[in-house]
Protein backbone atom coordinates (compact mmCIF):
# COMPACT_ATOMS: atom_id res chain seq x y z
CA UNK A 1 0.00 0.00 0.00
CA UNK A 2 1.34 3.44 -0.94
CA UNK A 3 0.01 6.55 0.80
CA UNK A 4 0.42 10.13 -0.40
CA UNK A 5 -0.33 12.32 2.61
CA UNK A 6 -1.44 15.95 2.72
CA UNK A 7 0.79 16.71 5.72
CA UNK A 8 -0.77 19.77 7.31
CA UNK A 9 -4.25 18.42 6.69
CA UNK A 10 -3.40 15.31 8.73
CA UNK A 11 -1.55 17.18 11.51
CA UNK A 12 -4.80 18.82 12.59
CA UNK A 13 -6.40 15.41 13.20
CA UNK A 14 -4.14 14.75 16.22
CA UNK A 15 -5.02 17.05 19.14
CA UNK A 16 -1.47 17.28 20.51
CA UNK A 17 -0.03 18.16 17.10
CA UNK A 18 -2.86 20.60 16.46
CA UNK A 19 -1.95 22.29 19.75
CA UNK A 20 1.65 22.69 18.58
CA UNK A 21 0.39 24.35 15.40
CA UNK A 22 -1.64 26.87 17.42
CA UNK A 23 1.47 27.55 19.53
CA UNK A 24 3.35 28.32 16.28
CA UNK A 25 5.62 25.30 16.75
CA UNK A 26 5.38 24.24 13.12
CA UNK A 27 8.62 22.28 13.03
CA UNK A 28 7.76 20.28 16.16
CA UNK A 29 4.29 19.47 14.82
CA UNK A 30 5.74 18.36 11.50
CA UNK A 31 8.35 16.13 13.17
CA UNK A 32 5.66 14.72 15.48
CA UNK A 33 3.53 13.72 12.50
CA UNK A 34 6.49 12.20 10.66
CA UNK A 35 7.45 10.18 13.76
CA UNK A 36 3.90 8.78 13.98
CA UNK A 37 3.88 7.96 10.29
CA UNK A 38 7.27 6.26 10.62
CA UNK A 39 5.90 4.10 13.46
CA UNK A 40 2.84 3.31 11.33
CA UNK A 41 5.12 2.22 8.48
CA UNK A 42 6.97 -0.16 10.81
CA UNK A 43 3.70 -1.74 11.93
CA UNK A 44 2.02 -2.00 8.53
CA UNK A 45 4.81 -2.08 5.95
CA UNK A 46 3.06 0.65 3.97
CA UNK A 47 5.04 3.10 1.84
CA UNK A 48 4.36 6.72 2.79
CA UNK A 49 5.12 10.02 1.09
CA UNK A 50 4.14 13.31 2.73
CA UNK A 51 3.67 16.72 1.13
CA UNK A 52 3.84 19.91 3.23
CA UNK A 53 2.90 23.40 2.11
CA UNK A 54 5.71 25.92 1.82
CA UNK A 55 9.32 25.64 2.92
CA UNK A 56 10.88 23.51 5.62
CA UNK A 57 12.48 26.63 7.06
CA UNK A 58 12.35 30.26 5.93
CA UNK A 59 15.80 30.38 4.35
CA UNK A 60 15.95 26.78 3.05
CA UNK A 61 14.94 25.91 -0.49
CA UNK A 62 14.77 22.17 0.18
CA UNK A 63 12.19 20.49 -2.03
CA UNK A 64 12.48 16.98 -0.60
CA UNK A 65 14.19 14.87 2.02
CA UNK A 66 13.87 11.53 3.78
CA UNK A 67 12.62 10.99 7.31
CA UNK A 68 13.59 7.37 7.92
CA UNK A 69 11.89 5.64 4.99
CA UNK A 70 9.33 8.40 4.44
CA UNK A 71 9.69 10.64 1.39
CA UNK A 72 8.95 14.21 2.47
CA UNK A 73 8.21 16.99 -0.03
CA UNK A 74 7.93 20.74 0.49
CA UNK A 75 5.87 22.73 -2.01
CA UNK A 76 7.98 25.94 -1.79
CA UNK A 77 6.14 28.53 -3.90
CA UNK A 78 3.42 26.06 -4.91
CA UNK A 79 0.68 24.63 -2.71
CA UNK A 80 0.78 21.09 -1.38
CA UNK A 81 -2.51 20.57 -3.25
CA UNK A 82 -0.76 21.30 -6.55
CA UNK A 83 2.09 18.85 -5.80
CA UNK A 84 -0.28 16.08 -4.72
CA UNK A 85 -2.28 16.48 -7.93
CA UNK A 86 0.93 16.44 -10.01
CA UNK A 87 2.22 13.29 -8.28
CA UNK A 88 -1.04 11.48 -9.01
CA UNK A 89 -1.29 12.79 -12.58
CA UNK A 90 2.30 11.75 -13.44
CA UNK A 91 2.22 8.37 -11.68
CA UNK A 92 2.20 5.49 -14.19
CA UNK A 93 -0.31 3.60 -12.03
CA UNK A 94 -2.29 6.05 -9.86
CA UNK A 95 -4.74 3.28 -8.88
CA UNK A 96 -2.05 2.00 -6.53
CA UNK A 97 -1.92 5.27 -4.57
CA UNK A 98 -4.13 6.17 -1.62
CA UNK A 99 -4.25 9.93 -1.13
CA UNK A 100 -4.79 11.00 2.48
CA UNK A 101 -6.58 14.35 2.63
CA UNK A 102 -9.90 15.91 3.54
CA UNK A 103 -9.53 18.61 0.89
CA UNK A 104 -12.56 18.23 -1.41
CA UNK A 105 -10.76 19.77 -4.40
CA UNK A 106 -7.89 17.26 -4.15
CA UNK A 107 -10.34 14.38 -3.66
CA UNK A 108 -12.33 15.36 -6.77
CA UNK A 109 -9.14 15.66 -8.83
CA UNK A 110 -7.36 12.43 -7.81
CA UNK A 111 -10.46 10.26 -8.10
CA UNK A 112 -10.57 11.17 -11.81
CA UNK A 113 -7.27 9.23 -12.07
CA UNK A 114 -8.79 6.39 -10.01
CA UNK A 115 -6.48 6.98 -7.08
CA UNK A 116 -7.98 5.82 -3.81
CA UNK A 117 -8.81 8.37 -1.13
CA UNK A 118 -8.86 8.14 2.64
CA UNK A 119 -9.90 11.24 4.54
CA UNK A 120 -7.43 12.56 7.09
CA UNK A 121 -9.95 11.77 9.83
CA UNK A 122 -10.24 8.15 8.67
CA UNK A 123 -6.49 7.75 8.35
CA UNK A 124 -5.79 9.26 11.80
CA UNK A 125 -8.34 6.83 13.28
CA UNK A 126 -6.74 3.96 11.32
CA UNK A 127 -3.29 4.93 12.66
CA UNK A 128 -4.57 5.08 16.24
CA UNK A 129 -6.36 1.72 15.97
CA UNK A 130 -3.31 0.07 14.40
CA UNK A 131 -1.14 1.25 17.29
CA UNK A 132 -3.73 0.22 19.90
CA UNK A 133 -4.02 -3.23 18.34
CA UNK A 134 -0.23 -3.63 18.31
CA UNK A 135 0.00 -2.64 21.99
CA UNK A 136 -2.91 -4.90 22.92
CA UNK A 137 -1.31 -7.89 21.16
CA UNK A 138 1.89 -7.39 23.16
CA UNK A 139 0.26 -6.81 26.54
CA UNK A 140 0.07 -10.03 28.53
CA UNK A 141 -3.42 -10.93 29.62
CA UNK A 142 -4.18 -10.65 33.30
CA UNK A 143 -7.19 -12.22 34.87
CA UNK A 144 -9.23 -9.85 36.99
CA UNK A 145 -10.03 -12.49 39.57
CA UNK A 146 -7.81 -15.54 39.07
CA UNK A 147 -8.99 -18.79 40.62
CA UNK A 148 -6.58 -21.31 42.10
CA UNK A 149 -7.15 -25.02 41.91
CA UNK A 150 -7.02 -27.03 45.15
CA UNK A 151 -3.62 -28.32 44.07
CA UNK A 152 -2.23 -24.80 43.51
CA UNK A 153 -3.71 -23.60 46.78
CA UNK A 154 -2.13 -26.53 48.62
CA UNK A 155 1.26 -25.76 47.06
CA UNK A 156 1.20 -22.14 48.24
CA UNK A 157 -0.05 -23.05 51.74
CA UNK A 158 2.75 -25.57 52.08
CA UNK A 159 5.32 -23.10 50.83
CA UNK A 160 4.32 -20.39 53.30
CA UNK A 161 3.86 -22.81 56.24
CA UNK A 162 7.44 -23.96 55.96
CA UNK A 163 8.84 -20.41 56.02
CA UNK A 164 10.33 -19.28 59.24
CA UNK A 165 8.88 -16.14 60.70
CA UNK A 166 11.45 -13.34 60.62
CA UNK A 167 11.05 -10.40 62.98
CA UNK A 168 12.22 -7.02 61.86
Image (spheres, rainbow, N blue to C red):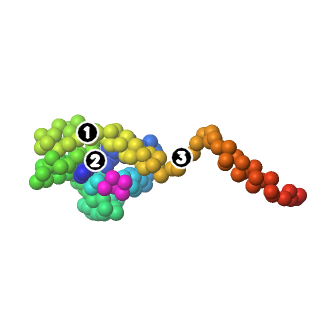
Q: How many marks?
A: 3
Disc 3 from disc 2: Cα separation: 38 Å
Frontmost of labels 3 and 2 is: 3
Element type at mark 1: loop
**Badge 3: residue crowd in 10 Å (few <14, some 14–19, many ≥20):** few
In this view, 69 is above or below 119: below
User: Residue drawn 62% across and 42% down?
Assistant: 146
**Residue 20 tag number:** none
Residue 31 is drawn in which quadrant?
Answer: bottom left
Disc 1 from disc 3: Cα separation: 42 Å
The answer to whether the residues at label 3 and label 2 have Cβ atoms under 8 Å apart is: no
Range shown magenta: 41-45
User: Residue drawn 34% across and 59% down?
Assistant: 57
The answer to whether the residues at label 2 and label 1 have Cβ atoms under 8 Å apart is: yes
Question: Which residue is under mark 2?
Answer: 6
Specify whether 86 is left or right of 122: left
- The percent position of residue 35, horizontal first and vertical second, equals 40, 56
Magenta stretch encompasses residue 62: no
- The percent position of residue 52, horizontal first and vertical second, equals 29, 52
Instruction: State whether the magenta stretch is mostly helix, strand or loop.
Output: helix
- The percent position of residue 25, horizontal first and vertical second, equals 43, 52
Element type at mark 3: loop
Residue 17 in view in this figure:
no
| In-front residue for pair 110/158 | 158
User: Residue drawn 29% across and 39% down?
Assistant: 119
Report the quarter where the C terminus lies: bottom right
Question: Which residue is under mark 1?
Answer: 103
Q: Which of marks 2 and 1 is nearer the N terminus?
A: 2
Question: Which residue is under mark 3?
Answer: 141
Q: Which of marks 1 and 3 is nearer the N terminus?
A: 1
Q: Which of marks 3 and 2 is nearer the N terminus?
A: 2
Amino acid sequence: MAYLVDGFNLIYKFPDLEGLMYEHKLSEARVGLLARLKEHMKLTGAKISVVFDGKKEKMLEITSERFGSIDVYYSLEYSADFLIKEFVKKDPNPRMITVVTSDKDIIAYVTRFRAKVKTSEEFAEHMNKTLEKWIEERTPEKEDNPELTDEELGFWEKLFKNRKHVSL
